[in-house]
């Protein structure tokens, strides 16, 4: 039996969000959550990624729906369908530049919702067909990992890794001896690295807890060797808990 498509709703009007959720359930889709702010949506995506996101363009908070869609597309590659009301031309052009998979104009009917999702599904299928997934460029063991480097698999003991840094669709692994580029996103490493040893401190960084030399008084950055690594507000609490600084 095929699993139902999983969708996240990002809409700051709770009445509208609840109505969308009901319509999706009627259509046989699974709603993974409802977020009213872009920042909360990004956190949800990190912890429980959906298949598709329904994103209102106009969101309150530090980040609007267009900015959130750009971030999610770059770092998580999850398709976004924009929910729009009457917008000016400049806003619409910014929305188009964010590369959504479809638009739904509010107010909308159930068939508009279904058609947008079906169009998005079709596009996802075409992309997967044209760009089949490559084999993973790393494998994980109890105390080490092997990464693909040129024409061989190289062993990296966990203790030798200082930190990992996202670099578009690649990941840079910084070790005591050498830096490596792996054509695998940072999220894939985060899912498999041991949680008691490695922690994400920023959307672009995972650090080895044993390698941290210092952390700033306001917990805004940390240092490993001569590297200064930012700590995001979203990840600060978890880092402080692991370092037992509370």
Image (cartoon, rainbow, N blue to C red):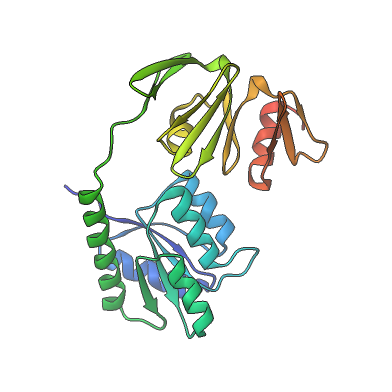
Query: In the image as oriented, which residue stretches furthest toward the front?
Result: 150
Relative to 153, 164 lies left or right: right
Residue 174 at x, y = what percent?
Answer: 57, 26
Residue 232 at x, y = what percent?
Answer: 66, 45
Instruction: Tell me if I can see residue 141 in this picture.
Output: no
Residue 125 at x, y = what percent?
Answer: 22, 55
Residue at 60 percent across and 17 percent down: it is: 176
Q: Is residue 149 above or below residue 217?
A: above
Query: In the image as oriented, which residue stretches furthest toward the left?
Result: 1
Tell me the quarter of the picture where residue 119 sits: bottom left
Q: Is residue 109 above or below residue 33?
A: below
Residue at 26 percent across and 77 percent down: it is: 111
Tell me the quarter of the picture where residue 97 sits: bottom left
Relative to 160, 225 lies left or right: right
Q: Nearer the viewer, residue 68 or 2?
A: 68
Viewport quadrant of the C terminus: top right
Say how many tags the image has. 0
Residue at 51 percent across and 32 percent down: it is: 172
Q: Nearer the viewer, residue 214 or 3?
A: 214
Instruction: Tell me if I can see residue 227 in this picture.
Output: yes
Q: Nearer the viewer, residue 220 or 41?
A: 220
Q: Is residue 158 above or below residue 96?
A: above
Residue 228 at x, y = what percent?
Answer: 71, 34
Query: In the image as oriented, which residue stretches furthest toward the right?
Result: 217
């Amino acid at each position: 039996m095929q699993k139902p498509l999983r969708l996240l709703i990002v809409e700051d009007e709770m009445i509208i969000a609840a109505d969308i959720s009901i319509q999706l359930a009627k259509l046989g889709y699974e709603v993974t959550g409802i977020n009213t702010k872009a920042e909360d949506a990004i956190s949800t995506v990190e912890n429980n990624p959906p298949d598709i996101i329904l994103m209102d363009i106009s969101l309150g908070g530090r980040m609007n729906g267009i900015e959130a869609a750009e971030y999610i597309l770059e770092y998580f590659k999850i398709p976004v369908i924009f929910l729009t009301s009457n917008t000016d031309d400049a806003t619409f052009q910014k929305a188009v530049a964010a590369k959504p998979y479809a638009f739904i104009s509010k107010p909308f009917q159930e068939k508009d919702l279904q058609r947008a999702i079906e169009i998005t599904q079709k596009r996802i299928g075409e992309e997967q067909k044209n760009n089949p997934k490559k084999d993973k460029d790393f494998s994980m063991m109890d105390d080490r990992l092997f990464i693909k480097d040129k024409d061989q698999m190289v062993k990296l003991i966990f203790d030798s890794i200082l930190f990992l840094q996202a670099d578009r669709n690649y990941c840079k692994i910084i070790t005591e001896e050498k830096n490596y580029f792996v054509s695998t996103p940072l999220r894939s490493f985060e899912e498999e690295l041991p949680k008691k040893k490695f922690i994400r401190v920023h959307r672009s960084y995972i650090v080895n807890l044993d390698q941290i030399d210092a952390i700033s008084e306001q917990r805004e950055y940390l240092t490993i060797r001569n590297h200064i690594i930012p700590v995001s507000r979203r990840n600060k609490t978890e880092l402080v808990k692991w370092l037992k600084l509370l």
